[in-house]
Image: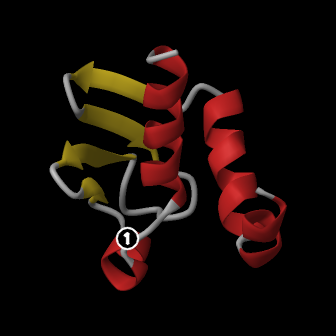
């Protein structure tokens, strides 16, 4: 994890903040709402668990195919499945 943290510190910091502040809500199997923090046009983003991973409605995911919202949902599911 140290190598990943060095590569993506802002992404991990934001992900952990979303989880710590309980801004991720599971609304159905494989479907989450995550409170938006930086985009004034959106109150929340929709994250879905798909066959090939997670998708998100935020701009960052559409640009980079990864975001703190999808990572937070993945980690939340992993914690629940333990």
Q: Secondary structure at mark 1?
A: helix
The image quadrant of residue 68 is: bottom right
Image spot of residue 31 (x, y percent): 23, 34
Vertical placement of 3 versus 50: above or below? below
Image spot of residue 40 (x, y percent): 47, 62
Determine crowd level at label 1: few under 14, some 14-19, many 20+ residues with C-alpha closer than 10 A. Answer: some
Give the residue drawn at x 36%, y 55%.
42
Image spot of residue 51 (x, y percent): 15, 50
Vertical placement of 4 versus 62: above or below? above
Q: Nearer the viewer, residue 5 or 57?
A: 5
Which residue in the rendered view is the most extreme toward the bottom? Answer: 63
Q: Nearer the viewer, residue 10 or 49?
A: 49
Q: Quadrant of the N terminus?
A: bottom right
Which residue in the rendered view is the most extreme toward the left? Answer: 51
Q: Nearer the viewer, residue 7 or 13?
A: 7
Identify residue for label 1: 61
Give the residue drawn at x 42%, y 51%.
70
Vertical placement of 14 versus 40: above or below? above
Q: In the image, is 18 to the left or to the right of 1? A: left
Image spot of residue 2 (x, y percent): 84, 61
Give the residue drawn at x 71%, y 72%.
8
Q: In the image, is 12 to the left or to the right of 77? A: right
Say how many tags the image has: 1
Q: In the image, is 1 to the left or to the right of 25? A: right
The image quadrant of residue 53 is: bottom left
Indicate the colouring scheme.
secondary structure
């Amino acid at each position: 994890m140290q190598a990943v943290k060095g590569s993506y510190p802002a992404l991990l910091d934001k992900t952990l903040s979303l989880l710590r502040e309980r801004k991720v809500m599971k609304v159905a199997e494989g479907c989450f709402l995550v409170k938006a923090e930086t985009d004034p046009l959106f109150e929340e983003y929709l994250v879905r668990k798909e066959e090939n991973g997670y998708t998100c409605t935020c701009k960052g995911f559409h640009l980079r195919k990864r975001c703190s919202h999808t990572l937070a949902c993945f980690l939340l599911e992993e914690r629940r499945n333990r």
